[in-house]
Image (spheres, helix red, strand yellow):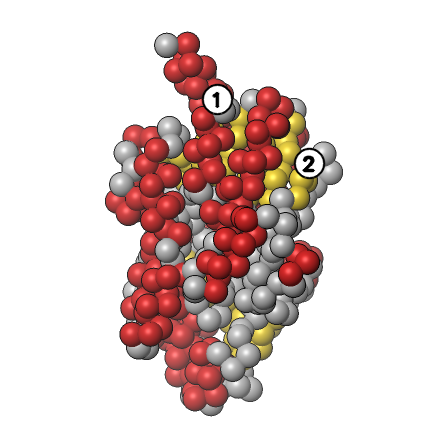
Amino acid sequence: MRVALLSYRSKPHCGGQGVYLRHLSRELVALGHTVEVFSGQPYPELDPGVTLTKVPSLDLYREPDPFRTPKLSEYRDLIDVEEVLTMWTAGFPEPKTFSKRIARVFTTRYADFDIVHDNQVLGYGMLDIEKLGVPLITTIHHPITFDRRVDLAAAPHFRKRLSLRRWYGFLRMQGKVARRLKRILTVSDSSRRDIATDFGVDIARIQVIPLGVDDVFVPPTQPRVPGRILAMASADSPMKGIRTLLEAVAKLATERDIELVLVCKPQTGGPTEKLIADLGIGNLVRFVHGVSDTELVALMGSAEIACVPSLYEGFSLPTAELMACETPLVVSRAGAIPEVVGPDGECADLVTPGDPEELTAALAALLDDPARREEMGRAGRRRVQDNFSWRAVAVATAAAYERVIEETHADADR
């Protein structure tokens, strides 16, 4: 099959979109399919055999100057104008403007593909592509409605809540588009239920294909660092639960020698840095970012315990990657995390999200039980090997493509 994979942004090493694109496209090519990825910035890191076609935005959120105002010479068309105006009014334009750009590209490219796979763009342009007669399938990792609810609940005042409502305004569009799509893929039963509920999609049109774990994630060859706790999450996103973890670490530090490594880059002077200062644990917390895959795997394997304190996850790929590294886990009983780790206590200890006391007790108990940590780590790796393979993801996804192609051609013949 000739596959077009679409993504409005594809950050290579964190966030689900770029990771999903890289591994799925590689395995589809290994199965004999032709794959061309269309992406806006940041562009994905892809493997040999996969073609990248850049569909540039104005890249308004790039580091080190997010929310920048472009120079007049950068504007190319009215879509660029819409992108900037939406940002200036506190909205997030990328899903909509990317979908318009890619729909324009496909007016001349649609005959080059057997299937178009939308990676959670869910912009109006996807419906324009479908009107061209190209079979279309969409992956929704989880409905961003959960992010909106958590962020609104954490907002300190009315003006901040108003700004967040504008930022998440694209969700109205995504819900409308999702309800009109013939076939949707998602990554967990939890996300399947939430997409049906929050977007009003017929649950029968949603198929679950869990994510895979890359072979680079392996157990450590060096001893783990005593007292090291590791977490991989966006530090300043309330949904990732880092506040709860920091409060637990502050309590643990009163009775034992520990350190916390956070694989993320916090906002300078942001809420996470402020909380660390307020708790007086600046000497115990270290941030790591911009590392290679090899360095990341070594870091994962260096921790005695990893923690995933999220308030919600559509899948939580880092959880599965940590399991592949035989790193014992304490995780939130939230979203799809229980699906990933399996029965409580076997591959991870599950705690109530947002409860620092319960998290403190779970971390302390696991730190004090090296035999159980070792047993838990081995069980986690076995679970990953048995359940989470990118080759299996590609095989199941290709089968879903074939069904959509058959259904689209059948509808056209009626």
Q: Of helix, strand and loop, which one carries label 1?
A: loop
Image-based side of 75 in relation to 117, left or right: right
Give the label, 1 or 2, closer to the camera. Answer: 1
x, y (%) of residue 315? 43, 49
* Image vertical order of residue 254 relative to residue 349, above or below: below
Tell me which label, 1 or 2, sits earlier in the chain: 2
Residue appearing at x 56%, y 22% in the figure: 114
Distance Cα–Cα, label 1 vs label 2: 24 Å
- Mark 2 closeness class: few <14, some 14–19, many ≥20 residues within 10 Å: some
x, y (%) of residue 321? 54, 53
Give the camera-side residue of 186 and 379: 186
For the C terminus, the image quarter is top left
Residue 175 visible here: yes
**Residue 131 appears in which quarter of the rendering?**
top left
For the N terminus, the image quarter is top right
In the orientation shown, which residue stands out farthest toward the right? 48
Residue appearing at x 60%, y 51% in the figure: 57
**Residue 37 appears in which quarter of the rendering?**
top right
Image-based side of 274 in relation to 225, left or right: left
Amino acid type at circle 2 is Val
x, y (%) of residue 341? 41, 51
Residue tagged 1: 133
In the orientation shown, which residue stands out farthest toward the top? 413
Residue tagged 2: 50
Residue appearing at x 46%, y 36% in the figure: 126
